[in-house]
């Protein structure tokens, strides 16, 4: 993922490797979202480099994109899936399939499902999961 | 209705871009969009959320001020199919770099065609990208954006960005937010009460949104008013952090401007100028020509204080005035002309300064019914008359024209300032007793009540000047050293500190007791270094005093 990122934006354009890693972490391993986060961070960057502040705002912006397409009832389901043991698919409903389709829910190796990391930053998700 | 139009920047709507007219919370959005449009090439898909067509149109006016060729496609009844939509877009290829697509909410409203049009968006993704070598700006309402993301997911996946230009109500409408103190004339107690009120509110519910930060900005200004620049800076930093977090870059620039004002007052003029220039560039990118002109005025103020009069004059004449003239802002034009007159006055061009005050400023304020500005301008006319030695006429204006106005307005600060000017004239005429009475009984109590630390220190300095003139050198020295200098040091007002040090030095020289000359030279040299560092015109005068002290003329 770091290589993908640096092919689009040279290492020297990041204030630190942590900023690049932060974007990768919040892409959920999804290359298109990684490049989208990079594009968003470019819009937010006020200086010559991608810094932590621009990366954080990019994450917030991508989270808002997902918030646009999620319904209130989606958040408890995402929380429930996230709490399920890794590799164990506990839901095969239309709702879960729809979440997979719109990428709010990501599927990793061996049918391990996990909500998109930016979705987990949303207040609605945190409230549904009783997180602070 | 014109359904289809191409336009060069700024002429696609009846009114040309004049000034910032959006919610400041959208400034970050606008700057991001500007960056995107300026750097984009080829097809880009951008969705823009709105909920008020009038506000959307204002945003479009602002966007059309960007240095990018724009066009608009309004989806009226004649665009009756997706093919026609594509054909109209294709016709714009090569003519512009971005196209606003408007009235999508109506175009997508019909249940009979809604589903198929979303499907068409999805299936025609490649065709759209091929036929539209420009940025496609789809103005949509929130439910349509959601439907677009879900029903045209492949095209949604190609979006470059989504911008939210929905107009929002102020997030907080608590009484504490609505209330305000009139900072020009509020008493120190009123300011302190307001500070306590804001702090209690923010402690209870600091909201990381624009309103919380706006309250912090007000708090910072109040701390500054009360002579606590460090507290002011700390508070403004907090406001700035919130504005940055919410990407409200316009308010962030405003907060930075207030911080630069404090830095400029402390003598950190290079830093302040750098900040003002950065802010100015941001206003320029936002198309906020008025705020840009105001910031230019702040730059000119600093340059003027540093004695760089020509540069200040050039900015006021060539950069500020034309903007206010274009905006038809007669008041700001008059104020700027007044600042030009200030410079002319400082250069000794009294006749032209007087002409500007009488012929350009006064008639405007009279026409606007602005009695306060009229009184202030009359005071400046009195300043010129005073400089020409016409003391009686100056006194008459202050007593008969200015004072009654301020008394009627209940403007205790301006009244005290005017009384101070009257005392200046009396002092110049040798009426030291009355000058001293005014300073002690009329001015000082007012500034103490207002909590205006700077004005109090300035007045005490003038009292010390009178005492020095009367030969009461010990008391003058005591006031300078114990009251005036510490106040200016606390305010970190570099210019005032160095002037005060120079005055103490001069008083030591006048007293001439054992060791006084050494103390005087030490203080004068310190003042000279600071004046040179800050590039102040006082440096020349101080150097002259030092020369005379070091090489006194031989007596008899």
Image: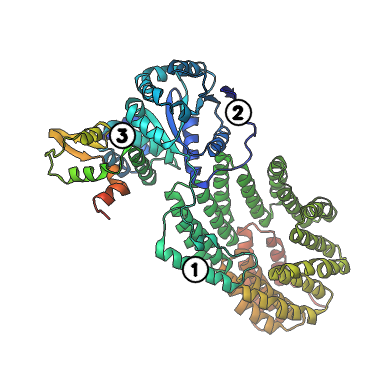
Give whichever of B292, B487 is nearer the camera.
Answer: B292
Residue at image coords 50%, 39%: B30
Q: Quadrant of the C terminus of chain B?
A: bottom right
Residue at image coords 55%, 49%: B274
User: Where in the figure is residue B529, as x and y percent of width and height?
Assistant: 61, 63
N-terminal of the pair, mark 2 or mark 1, is 2
Give the secondary structure at mark 2: loop
Q: Do pointers 2 and 1 mark residues of a single chain?
A: yes
Q: Do pointers 3 and 1 mark residues of a single chain?
A: no
Q: Do pointers 3 and 2 mark residues of a single chain?
A: no
User: What chain does mark 1 sit on?
Assistant: B
What's the mark number on residue B197? 1
Give the secondary structure at mark 1: helix
Q: CA distance from mark 3 to mark 1?
A: 45 Å
Q: Nearer the viewer, mark 3 or mark 2?
A: 2
Q: CA distance from mark 3 to mark 2?
A: 35 Å
Residue neighbourhood size for the residue with mark 2, other residues' Cα within 10 Å, grouped as few (<14), some (14–19), many (≥20)? some
Q: Which residue is mark 3?
A: A33
Give whichever of B463, B255 is nearer the camera.
Answer: B255
From the viewer's perspective, tell me whether residue B224 is left or right of residue A29: right
User: What chain does mark 3 sit on?
Assistant: A
Q: Which residue is mark 2?
A: B12
User: What chain does mark 2 sit on?
Assistant: B
Give whichever of B3, B30 is nearer the camera.
Answer: B3
Q: Can residue B411 be seen in the rendering of this structure?
A: yes
Q: CA distance from mark 2 to mark 1?
A: 47 Å
């Amino acid at each position: 993922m770091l290589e993908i990122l640096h092919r689009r934006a040279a290492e020297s354009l990041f204030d630190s490797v942590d900023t690049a890693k932060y974007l990768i972490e919040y892409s959920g391993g999804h290359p298109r979202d990684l490049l989208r986060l990079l594009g968003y961070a470019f819009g937010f960057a006020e200086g010559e480099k991608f810094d932590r502040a621009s990366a954080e705002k990019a994450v917030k912006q991508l989270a808002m994109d997902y918030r646009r397409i999620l319904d209130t009832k989606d958040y408890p389901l995402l929380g429930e899936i996230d709490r399920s043991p890794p590799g164990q698919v506990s839901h095969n409903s239309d709702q879960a399939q729809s979440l997979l389709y719109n990428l709010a829910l990501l599927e990793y190796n061996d049918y391990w499902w996990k909500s998109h990391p930016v979705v987990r930053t949303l207040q609605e998700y945190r409230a549904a999961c009783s997180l602070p | 209705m014109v359904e289809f139009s191409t336009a060069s920047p700024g002429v696609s709507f009846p009114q040309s871009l004049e000034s910032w007219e959006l919610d400041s919370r959208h400034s970050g959005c606008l700057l991001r969009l500007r960056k995107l449009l300026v750097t984009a090439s080829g097809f880009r898909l951008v969705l823009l959320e709105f909920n008020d067509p009038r506000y959307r149109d204002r945003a479009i006016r602002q966007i059309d001020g960007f240095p990018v060729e724009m066009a608009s496609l309004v989806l009226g009844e004649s665009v009756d199919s997706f093919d026609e939509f594509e054909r109209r877009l294709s016709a714009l290829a090569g003519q512009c770099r971005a196209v606003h697509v408007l009235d999508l909410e109506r175009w997508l409203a019909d249940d009979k065609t809604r589903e198929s049009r979303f499907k068409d968006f999805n299936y025609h993704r490649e065709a759209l990208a091929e036929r539209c070598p420009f940025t496609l700006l789809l103005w949509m309402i929130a439910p349509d954006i959601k439907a677009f993301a879900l029903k045209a997911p492949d095209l949604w996946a190609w979006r470059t960005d989504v911008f939210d230009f929905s107009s929002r109500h102020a997030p907080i409408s608590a009484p504490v937010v609505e209330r305000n103190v009139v900072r020009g004339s509020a008493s120190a107690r009123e300011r302190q009460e307001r500070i306590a009120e804001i702090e209690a509110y923010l402690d209870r519910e600091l909201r990381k949104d624009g309103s919380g930060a706006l309250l912090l900005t007000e708090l910072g200004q109040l701390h500054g008013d009360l002579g606590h620049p460090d507290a002011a800076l700390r508070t403004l930093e907090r406001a700035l952090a919130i504005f940055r977090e919410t990407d409200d870059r316009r308010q962030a620039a405003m907060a930075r401007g207030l911080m630069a004002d404090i830095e400029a007052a402390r003598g950190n003029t290079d830093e302040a100028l750098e900040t003002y220039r950065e802010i100015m560039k941001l206003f320029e990118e936002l198309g906020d020509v008025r705020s840009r002109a105001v910031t230019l005025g702040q730059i000119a103020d600093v340059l003027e204080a540093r004695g760089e009069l020509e540069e200040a004059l050039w900015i006021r004449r060539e950069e500020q005035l034309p903007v206010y003239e274009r905006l038809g802002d007669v008041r700001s034009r008059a104020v700027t002309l007044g600042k030009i007159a200030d410079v002319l006055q400082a250069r000794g061009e009294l006749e032209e300064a007087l002409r500007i005050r009488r012929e350009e400023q006064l008639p405007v304020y009279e026409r606007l019914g602005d009695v306060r500005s009229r009184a202030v301008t009359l005071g400046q006319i009195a300043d010129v008359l005073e400089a020409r030695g016409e003391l009686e006429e100056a006194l008459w204006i202050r007593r008969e024209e200015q004072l009654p106005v301020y008394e009627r307005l209940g403007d205790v600060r301006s009244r005290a300032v005017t009384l101070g000017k009257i005392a200046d004239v009396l002092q110049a005429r040798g009426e030291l007793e009355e000058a001293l009475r005014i300073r002690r009984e009329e001015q000082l109590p007012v500034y103490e009540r207002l909590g205006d630390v700077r004005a109090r220190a300035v007045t005490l300095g003038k009292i010390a000047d009178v005492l020095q003139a009367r030969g009461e050198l010990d008391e003058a020295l005591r006031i300078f050293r114990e009251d005036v200098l510490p106040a200016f040091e606390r305010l970190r007002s570099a210019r005032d500190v160095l002037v005060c040090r120079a005055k103490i030095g001069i008083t030591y020289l006048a007293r001439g007791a054992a060791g006084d000359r050494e103390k005087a030279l030490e203080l004068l040299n310190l003042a000279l270094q600071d004046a040179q560092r800050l590039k102040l015109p006082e440096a020349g005068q101080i150097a002259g005093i030092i020369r005379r002290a070091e090489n006194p003329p031989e007596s008899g």
